[in-house]
Amino acid sequence: MVSAQSELRPEGSESLAGQFRRIRSLSLELTAPLTTEDQVVQTLPEVSPTKWHLAHVTWFFEHFCLEQRLASYRPFDDRFHFLFNSYYQTLGKMQSRPQRGLLSRPTVEEIHRYRHYVDDAVISMLETHWEDPELAFLIALGLHHEQQHQELMLTDIKHVFFNNPMFPAYGRRAASTDSNTDLGFRAYPGGQFEIGAGEVDFCFDNETPRHTVLLQDYGLADRLVTNEEYRQFIEDRGYEDPAIWLADGWATIREQDWNRPLYWSDDCAREFTLGGWQDLELHAPVTHVSYYEADAFARWAGTRLPTEAEWEVAASKAPVQGNFLESGFLSPVPSNKNQRPSQMYGDAWEWTASPYDSYPGFKPLAGSLGEYNGKFMCNQMVVRGGSCVTQLEHIRASYRSFFYPHDRWQFLGFRLARDL
């Protein structure tokens, strides 16, 4: 990871304490449409209750910034270390991930008090240690970590509401202006390129080190695959043709009885969104599909998925803009026909053909923070670009996220590629 900027900052820029207050406040703002009962439900092992997210990100600050660096600090409740540690095995035992929904206590109200207690302690610490670059780094890491969980809060509550027979809506979905064009491909010349994070204020360790890759000439679709195009794949019996599926993918769709994206209705005419059930927006990007489904579609279309290096080289030439959380849509929207290539950022995390692995020379962070990314570099696939519930300031061309190839509950879509 690259060090974050401390409070020694250019005049007029936001202070680290200001960032802390703003980002921490957003977590509570995102829960405003939810009832207390909404925040305690877990529908999948991958889906955590909202209140667990609120507590876990607070535990992160409490443990790594306060307990480990401030001798006078007293934890809010010693039992929370077991309840809200996520996967840091070097720090001791923890509540099983699939059983987070069994925790009726602490209550949502108690977790709010926990957040205020830790926030006050962090702000006080920043006032007296504002020149400490190591603390600045830990706070920045914690804030980016919280932004990841703010996205998870929305994707998780979507799954919770989808599994409720009342199909509640999180909030009204903003209307989008329909705009699209036929799918085209943009050519990118091969050669040697550098990918990975360069000199930036902050990045995660899995984005480093910057290194050279060799690419052949390739073409990349100028927008994401749409609902209409994916529905054509379904109508052409794509889910019934084993010739276009990876072996594990074919076994998965048979075992799980998949024949459409996760949130589509049986007749493929409607889609469940954070705004409730809506008519399928044909020109919007298809989402909530697994890597297996994206790969099968690409084979059916006579194309392939891009590698993460191909994606990053193309994305680094495009401005970081798009349909993010700030847009207010909370769903993917059709691409802008006047902007090509489009949707490189936002709308949907894009599956790549690259397994999640370390870059040459990668070194995880020292100590328990080394468990943040490095230990997951096995059996997962890289996704790029962010989604409609990612925050704009959180994403960059070098950002690497990762999911198991069967995962679908996230806003996962894809872009086609081909050899030239």
Image: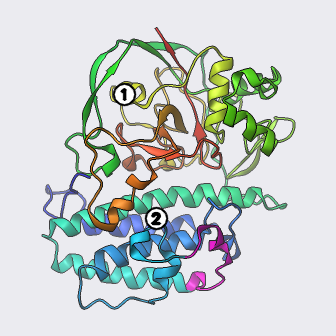
The residue that appears at 71% across and 63% down in the rendered structure is 43
At mark 2, the secondary structure is helix
Q: Kindly identify the residue that appears in the image at 46 percent across and 56 percent down.
A: 148
Looking at the picture, how far across and down is residue 376, in whole percent?
45, 52
In the image, residue 40 lies in the stretch drawn in magenta: no
Q: Amino acid at mark 2?
A: Leu
Figure check: 143 above or below 349? below
Relative placement, left or right, of 81 versus 271 is left
Query: Mark 1 = which residue?
Result: 318
Residues rendered magenta in the picture: 95-109
Query: Which residue has dot 2 on it?
Result: 26
User: Is there CB contact under 8 Å for labels 2 and 1?
Assistant: no
Q: Earlier in the sequence, mark 2 or mark 1?
A: 2
Instruction: Please state which of residues 161 and 65 is positioned toward the viewer in this rendering.
Output: 65
Mark linked to residue 292: none
Tell me: 5 left or right of 289: left
Circle 1: is it few (<14), some (14-19), or many (20+) Cα within 10 Å? some
How far from the left and from the top, in percent, is residue 185?
A: 51, 14
Which of the two residues, 44 or 262, is positioned nearer the viewer here?
A: 44
**Mark 2 or 1, closer to the camera:** 1
- Residue at 73% across, 33% down: 250
Q: Is residue 298 visible?
A: yes
Query: Looking at the rendering, which quadrant does residue 167 occupy?
Result: bottom right
